[in-house]
Image (spheres, coloured by chain):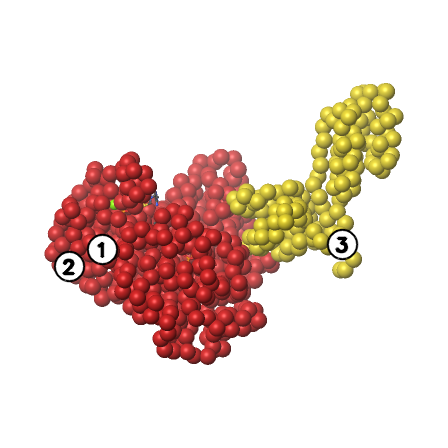
Amino acid sequence: MTMKGAEVLLHCLQEEEVEVIFGYPGGAVLPIYDALYASDIKHVLVRHEQGAAHAADGYARATGKVGVCLATSGPGATNLVTGIATAYMDSIPMVAFTGQVPTPLIGRDAFQEADITGITLPITKHNYLVQHSRDLARVVKEAFHLARTNRPGPVVVDLPRDIMAREVDPSEQQAEIGLKGYRVVRNCNMGQVLLAVNAIEKAERPVIYAGGGVIGSDASETLQELALKRDIPVTTTLMGVGCFPETHHLSLGMLGMHGTRYANYAVSESDLLIAVGVRFDDRVTGKISSFAPHARVIHIDIDAAEIGKNYGVDIPIVGNVKQVLEEIVIRLQPREGRCEWHHTIDRWKEQFPLVYPESYEDGRIPPQFVVEQIYQVTEGEAIITTEVGQNQMWAAQFYKYTRPRRFITSGGLGTMGFGLPAAIGARIGCPHLPVINIAGDGSIQMNIQELCTAVEQRLPVITCILNNHYLGMVRQWQQLFFNGRYSYTDMSQQPDFVKLAEAFGAVGIRVKKAEDVVPAIEEALTVTDRPVVIDFWVTREANVFPMVPPGESLYNMLGGDE
Amino acid sequence: MIMKHTLSVIVENHPGVLARVAGLFRRRGYNIDSLTVGRTENPAISRMTIVVEGDDVLIEQVTKQLHKLVEIMKIQDITDEPSVDRELVLVKVKADAQVRGEIMQIVEIFRARIVDIGPNSLIIEATGDENKINAIEDSLRPFGLLELVRTGKVAMVRGGR
Ligand SMILES: Cc1cc2nc3c(=O)[nH]c(=O)nc-3n(C[C@H](O)[C@H](O)[C@H](O)COP(=O)(O)OP(=O)(O)OC[C@H]3O[C@@H](n4cnc5c(N)ncnc54)[C@H](O)[C@@H]3O)c2cc1C
Ligand SMILES: Cc1ncc(C[n+]2csc(CCOP(=O)(O)OP(=O)(O)O)c2C)c(N)n1
Ligand SMILES: [Mg+2]
């Protein structure tokens, strides 16, 4: 029996238990689309390939499974690039398939040829150009294996058209993973674990600094065990939001540039920082030389290259977060009860809570209030995706996340246009949860075409635009650091988002008064068969506080101290 | 302390491995002093010898980042290992009749070879460690170097397997 290359490909995807592909067709992938026509694998037709990449990414973040996207050669493949880079920076498991011109034409500047493996070299964990039919099954298997193991990340597989169209003998396919130089990390150094246990038992002012690695390795419960066993306060990065319940008294919320005052103070005063699945990003550390100045630092990370990359640590442990934490927790003597450290932190929490002005001069709705109401109405149970900018920071600060994989945001690359397609992917992965994209008026215009995808798929994803008629985050920096010179950040010229939503076949709602906020959210949540856009006209010049000015030490924050 | 390190890197012999390594150095701003690559006794495997300058922290990062490239199988910093390292140089030097004798003496001293004779020039081939090659280069310079090409270093640890 023979099969076409494209059929072998789809067969391999089924072996990997792929449920859904986000894609967009074109000449070079016609053979694959022909095979999809008769396949059980669900295909979601996006309206721009960038949307396909972000949707696959959102699906992966919400479910923990590998997200899959597909695009044609040339412009299709290059349109994926921003989405691939977004997934790479946040270590998200994804496999992106791209069409390529037929093998005899490669290198001749053929129609719609782009060297996508060359282009994506620095933004993929690994990538492949399949040059022989016999490699197909092995490459697909390796791609998924690489995407999901160790530090996850995107893998690109470039598929020349002739290899997809040609008949191949399935018995020639090797399905063994090669990868001689790649080992899945299974152990950790027990000596280091014991050092960590000892340091934790001796510490008087410990803080856990937890990040995306905790979510990626599904270690939230183990992390909670560690915190509760020794009553250790926990702060998370933006990427770690939700890995520890923010409603718990040990939670310090987020740290970093827009973290809470009490989280940043706690880290700065701590004598032991337990860094778990984090990468000491500059948005977190502020001025690196004065980060956690009094602390010994334990750093648990599966990627040895992260250890010491930005910050010298005292007790490095290379390993899987979940496994390392388990080894630590079983060896720890429990210690409960409150001590001086907890009282200090309580005082900071009382003195410097996350707050915002009840009203602003322009009389428009405070954006933070909108986020709080979204939290209240959804009872903290929604999946929140975000765009980038002030909207993203307020979504992190004013919604209380209690579970992992409920806050989906582009942290490392900060990609405007991420939120809507990511929400589509998340909703497809988790069809029983409300999915809300907290958006900015600038960002939403970057991938608004995906509303059409959501309409076609009958997905009730809700986009809440915090419409300040500004590129607000950039405007904030101009106000604070460039003498208020608002150079090209005014977004007053914008479409009527309500009419635009309706034109796409979605529901559009406009809210200009605080008392209409809750009813609008409630109304949106009753819609079950199409997307909703709520255009909240919020205060134009609200700022995100607290804020660590660029280059400053973490404990020198602006705002949030009234 | 900033010094030159010699990394012996065993890689799968796939097309594109060199681009990945070079890309990594470029992207992260590491400076390659020299890089050689060729296949080993096993045709599926190649060996790169990379000379890179930096302090210990940088070399550690370089090594760890290289390790993340999926096709890299093994990395050894052989700077402090007892090892043999060699480089090859080809030099085209100006040589009219008057100075030929002198040049040939230098060739003799360094156990180099003359591999081509032109009307006004010679091509000299020499192998040796970096110091020797530097010395040959310096000795020939006064005659006028028309062209010079060095291969960069290859190295192997002594004894053992
Ligand atoms: C406008 C804007 C403002 C921002 N402000 C802030 C801010 O105030 N505070 C903040 O925190 N961030 C902020 N960010 C995000 C910031 O840029 C980084 O994306 C984020 O801090 C990185 O989070 P992380 O350290 O958890 O690392 P991630 O990028 O999530 O990396 C995860 C780490 O865990 C490791 N890992 C992965 N899987 C495992 C495993 N199984 N076992 C062990 N280790 C594993 C990885 O190797 C990696 O080192 C902001 C972003 C934007 C766009
Ligand atoms: C693709 C892309 N282009 C530019 C930026 C730089 N940038 C970061 S935040 C921001 C403003 C976003 O404006 P808006 O979506 O209205 O959000 P707001 O800050 O007003 O909530 C810009 C332009 C970016 N992060 N991504
Ligand atoms: Mg805005």
Q: Nearer the viewer, residue A461 or B120?
A: B120
**Image coordinates for residue A472, horizontal then vertical, percent:** 27, 45
Which residue is denoted by mark 2 in the rendering?
A518
Q: Residue at x 49, y 77 (%)?
A: A331
**Image coordinates for residue A338, horizontal then vertical, percent:** 35, 75
Which amino acid, by three-letter code, is at mark 3? Pro
Which residue is denoted by mark 3 in the rendering?
B82
- Residue A454 visible: no
Q: Quadrant of residue A459?
A: bottom left
Tell me the CA gap for discs 1 and 3: 66 Å
Q: Chain of mark 3?
A: B
Residue A401 vs residue B77: left or right? left
Disc 2 + disc 3, Cβ < 8 Å: no
Tag in front: 2 or 1: 1
Q: Which dot marks residue B47? A: none
Badge 1, how many Cα within 10 Å: few under 14, some, many 20+? some
Q: Residue at x 78, y 25 (%)?
A: B143
Q: Chain of mark 2?
A: A
In the image, are marks 1 and 3 on the same chain? no
Which amino acid, by three-letter code, is at mark 2? Val
Which amino acid, by three-letter code, is at mark 1? Tyr
Q: Quadrant of residue A185?
A: bottom right
Q: Chain of mark 1?
A: A
Residue A334 vs residue B127: left or right? left
Report the chain shown in red. Answer: A
Report the chain shown in yellow. Answer: B
Q: Nearer the viewer, residue A216 or B139?
A: B139
Q: Is residue A530 above or below residue B150?
A: below
